[in-house]
Amino acid sequence: MSIETFGTISMLSSVINCSTSNQNEEPKATFFVSKEGNDVWSGKLAAPNAEKTDGPFATVVRARDAIREMKARQSLSEPVTVMVRGGTYYLDDTIVFGQEDSGAKNCPITYMAYPGEEPVISGGREITAPWKTCKGDIMVCSIEEVKENKWNFRQLFVNGKRQKRARLPHEGYYYIEEALGDVEFRFKDGHFQNWRNLNDVEVVVFHSWNESRLLISELNETARTVKFIDPKARHTIGWSGAGGPNRYYIENVFEGLQNPGDWYLDRHTGELYYWPIDEIEKSVVVAPVLNQLVRFEGGIKEQHVQYINLCGFTFSDTDWNLPEKGYPDCGDVGDIVEPSAITLENVRYCTLKDNCIRNVGTYALELTGYGNQITGNEIYSTGGGGIISRNYDEERNVISYNHIHHCGEVYPSAVGINIDDGGGVISHNLIHDISHSGVYTRHWATEHQTIERENQEQGLIIEYNEIYDVMQKINDGGGLFVRDSNIIIRNNVIHDVFSYSDRCPGWGIYLGCETRDTIVENNIVYRAREIVHVWYYDRNVVMENNIFIDGELSQINYQNPSHLSHENIKLLRNIICYSKPDALLFKLSGERSLPLESDYNVFFHTAGKDIVNSGAPGLDSFEEWQKRGLDTNSIVADPLFVDVANDDYSLKPDSPALKLGFKPIDISEVGLRGRENK
């Protein structure tokens, strides 16, 4: 096995320090930005004098330009810091940093929050039009820019929280009655009507692991048929891989205004309808104007943006665009829809630390480059996923200590962290409440996502992450969903992974599509439809010293299509314990899916049921399994966990697993635990 065994990159201990050394001293920086500032001033900290002739800048862009001017006079000789005071900075355009804005190794350029304050960089605009009562508790206001076709928005945020675009059904899904073609189906009685502004209605149709967002071209209420503009989706309505009738919901329908927090925009009349949660007069209502807040714009090859740090900001309020013919689907998993709210193109040695990215229309952050650090950020309420990373060099990106949650509001196939290409270190992140997978790596190029994918062999470490409550809206994914080669998965805690339905189960760890040269060790995975999936010609994979608990259907699914076989799969010194009466130990696709070696494991069915397998005739019972030379030194015994009721899977001193060489797993550093010491 040719697995590169590298350790956690030392950059984790050298992340830029974005705080002042002495909180009792007046903060020192090269430039300051304030809501009370002025872009014609010097950018200094001193408050404006009585005549208001000097003081901080008013915008980050002016501070950026001042640094350009400073660099034009002479090369940097010391680090540059821009401190931004608290308040909300509404952008008129995306903040762009080019190669000319770069710092240097010993002279980085840092944009940071003023100590103890929270600057918010917003791509939205506050709606100040007067509200009046429409019907019942529903309020309405008129926005002239919308009526004049100068502004259209698909998201709304009130008091910093995402509101629900009016939809039917209000919760859950409808199911098609009959597929009538690639872009047509028969619906059940009452699901569609000839609503007002029917051409603005969007129908989100789920296929299995992805979805399409379709626009109506024809509706026949009598025949109960609806036909859509063809967006040329890879997965069409009625596609056999959907596993049954497509589910769908209908969005941007006035009749969907049913509960507090619902809203609807009539772009033809310019009227915004909203059912407020709190008093509308005391609420801050913001709609997005921009799709992107910040872009680092590196050139080609060695024309990098480098040594720029962003620390302590809240980035908020961006939108997403719908193509003229609708959104087809991403073809695979991940739903990478451009642009991401923060996009770093061809960057190196840059840091994003202790920021919050929220209320955005697509992915929060998209990173292409090497040697960068994304650490300590909170990402939530995203239309797409959390973080995308691509790396075409030997120096890895480090993505660590981030809290990523409640993602996939618009594009539910998006994931928490998407390693689109290359390797890196994905460590100590807390990821939960995600519509699809927690971490997803290296999917194949698709018609709509033709990224180069040139560096799939670079080593990738996924370690010390805590992942739970993922796969909430879609099927066929997992807590960790990996593909390709040279991956180390270790010391993660993953639990409660249940796909929307059991058509394609949610797996704790999904070793998919030619996973090879990979180690899975020291992980604790509990409560999932299936704990581990070994799928599609996997090779040179070792699963050792893991604890796998309570797969609803099976614990490990060794699966292959009929023309392929796994090669050199090993399962050694693991604890596998489960309680469902009908659950299997191993689910197999015939002999072609058998592991090469399986031994020194502890198996236990807490209900006292026999250990059984399925899918390989003659290997259904544990006794038959052992006669084939598999698990001859393994035992069926209670592993003696300390406190199963409270998910404490540490072992008592007399655990039989210890006698077979199992090493206790320490979870004290998993997720965000211990970050205060870093």
Image (cartoon, rainbow, N blue to C red):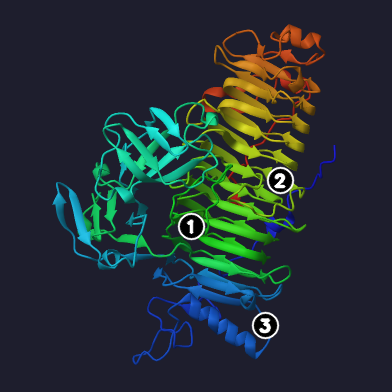
Closer to the camera, 377 or 190?
190
Task: Say what secondary structure mark 2 lies in.
Answer: strand
Closer to the camera, 660 or 279?
279
Residue 250 in view, yes or no: yes
Of label 1 and label 2, which has the lower sequence position?
A: 1
410 relative position to 269: left or right: right
Residue 338: image location, x then y, percent: 53, 57
- Identified at 66% across, 13% down, the residue is 613
- Identified at 63% across, 31% down, the residue is 524
- Identified at 48% across, 57% down, the residue is 357
Q: In the displayed image of the protein, which residue is found farthest to the right? A: 1
Residue 84: image location, x then y, percent: 47, 73
Per the model, the C-alpha gap separating discs 1 and 2 is: 24 Å
Residue assigned mark 1: 357
Per the model, the C-alpha gap separating discs 2 and 3 is: 36 Å
Name the kind of residue labelled 2 in the image. Ile
Task: Say what secondary structure mark 1 lies in.
Answer: strand
Vertical relation: 85 (above or below) 339: below
239 relative position to 521: left or right: left
Name the kind of residue labelled 3 in the image. Leu
How packed mark 3 is, by other alpha carbons closer than 10 Å (few <14, some 14-19, many 20 or more), is some
Residue assigned mark 2: 461
Residue assigned mark 3: 76
